């Protein structure tokens, strides 16, 4: 109850608080922090973060989505967000309000030219992640979902040190090339004491829209086998769906469209698995509004 008013509206001011203390105050208002990560690029981390956040928000949870892929941000485009973020009078960053239950922050939304290359070394990247956590008006959230870049470098390391109670959701595809790098991600989490919520297999196969036959594009079952071998909880499989690609390009996530598809069903089951692991399964919307 002694934090800076800029950081927490329920507290009275103390301008001598450090950045770490401000971050602690902000994070204390967020119940669950989830880091979507993988040691392999191209496995669909941003898609998983997008659809997990959207599924949770549609169920009535208050969700923040933070894109810390500083060199290749894609979250704003997947949601069709344009323009730079607003800055409040107290210099706080105001997230994009995609829907009443979903706020989004990305480095792309802080650039006038979205095609500009971010050429930063580790300390600068750490500094902007600190700013995202300390200066953003996240307010009270049920979930903060962090979309991390591939690998085990500066960004996931910064998050693991700044958000000590975060839990990792590791994304893979079924083929062995991806699974080898995913095993490195699991070992990274264990070395830096980042709890692992579970492993999700993305692009696990294609349901043919013409004959409904299942087509294993990248083999099948690799994620489940890896979770068993590495003793990590398995959160489910998300099938490949060309409409997800189209929706990302148009800035209209397919979860916003009507109709039931194998991908929609799998995303909702994945979200339920996450809620079950966190002890939030079955809670009515009214409890979270």
Image (cartoon, rainbow, N blue to C red):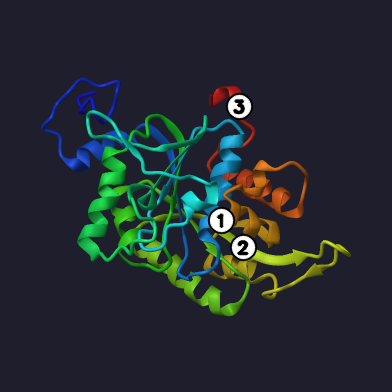
Q: CA distance from mark 1 to mark 2?
A: 9 Å
Q: Of the numbered discs in the image, which one, if any, rests on residue 285?
A: 3
Q: Is residue 275 visible?
A: no
Secondary structure of the residue carrying tag 3 is: helix
Q: Residue at x 58, y 79 (%)?
A: 176
- Which residue is most to the bottom? 177
Nearer mark to the viewer, of 1 and 2? 1
Q: Is residue 70 left or right of residue 16?
A: right
Secondary structure of the residue carrying tag 2 is: strand
Task: Specify which label sits upstream in the sequence, 1 or 2.
Answer: 1
Q: Is residue 183 above or below residue 30?
A: below
Q: Quadrant location of the N terminus?
A: top left
Q: Residue at x 17, y 23 (%)?
A: 13
Check whether the beta carbons of the residues at disc 1 and disc 2 lie within 8 A of each other. Answer: yes
- Which residue is most to the front? 113
Residue that mark 1 sits on: 47
Task: Specify which label sits upstream in the sequence, 2 or 3.
Answer: 2
Q: Position of residue 58 (x, y in %)?
A: 61, 35
Q: Position of residue 203 (x, y in %)?
A: 65, 65
Q: Quadrant of residue 171?
A: bottom right
Q: Is residue 80 above or below residue 57?
A: below
Q: Is residue 242 left or right of residue 184?
A: right
Pick the front one: 82 or 280? 82
Pick the front one: 15 or 179? 15
Q: Quadrant of residue 283?
A: top right
Q: Residue at x 67, y 75 (%)?
A: 218
Q: Position of residue 242 (x, y in %)?
A: 69, 61
Q: Of the numbered discs in the image, which one, if any, rests on residue 202?
A: 2
Q: Neighbour class for label 3 at 10 Å: few (<14), some, many (≥20)?
A: few
Q: Position of residue 56 (x, y in %)?
A: 57, 39
Q: Is residue 283 left or right of residue 143?
A: right
Q: Neighbour class for label 1 at 10 Å: few (<14), some, many (≥20)?
A: some
């Amino acid at each position: 109850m002694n934090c800076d008013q800029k950081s927490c509206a329920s507290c009275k001011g103390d301008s001598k608080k450090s950045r770490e203390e401000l971050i602690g105050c902000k994070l204390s208002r967020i119940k669950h922090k989830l880091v979507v990560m993988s040691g392999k690029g191209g496995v669909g981390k941003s898609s998983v973060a997008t659809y997990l956040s959207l599924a949770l928000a549609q169920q009535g949870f208050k969700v923040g989505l933070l894109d810390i892929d500083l060199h290749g941000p894609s979250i704003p485009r997947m949601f069709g967000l344009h323009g730079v973020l607003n800055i409040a009078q107290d210099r706080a960053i105001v997230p994009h309000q995609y829907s009443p239950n979903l706020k989004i922050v990305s480095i792309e939304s802080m650039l006038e030219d979205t095609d500009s290359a971010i050429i930063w070394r580790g300390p600068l990247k750490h500094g902007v992640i600190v700013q995202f956590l300390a200066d953003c008006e996240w307010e009270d959230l049920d979930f903060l979902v962090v979309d991390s870049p591939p690998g085990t470098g500066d960004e996931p390391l910064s998050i693991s040190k700044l958000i000590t109670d975060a839990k990792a959701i590791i994304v893979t595809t079924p083929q062995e090339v991806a699974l080898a790098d995913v095993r490195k991600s699991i070992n990274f989490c264990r070395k830096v004491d980042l709890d692992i919520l579970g492993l999700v297999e993305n692009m696990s196969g294609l349901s043919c829209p013409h004959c409904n036959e299942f087509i294993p594009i990248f083999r099948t079952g690799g994620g489940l086998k890896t979770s068993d071998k590495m003793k990590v909880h398995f959160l489910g499989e998300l099938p490949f769906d060309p409409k997800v690609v189209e929706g990302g390009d148009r800035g209209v996530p397919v979860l916003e469209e009507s109709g039931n598809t194998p991908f929609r069903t799998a995303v909702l089951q994945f979200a339920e698995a996450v809620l079950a692991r966190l002890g939030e399964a079955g809670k009515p919307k009214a409890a979270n509004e």
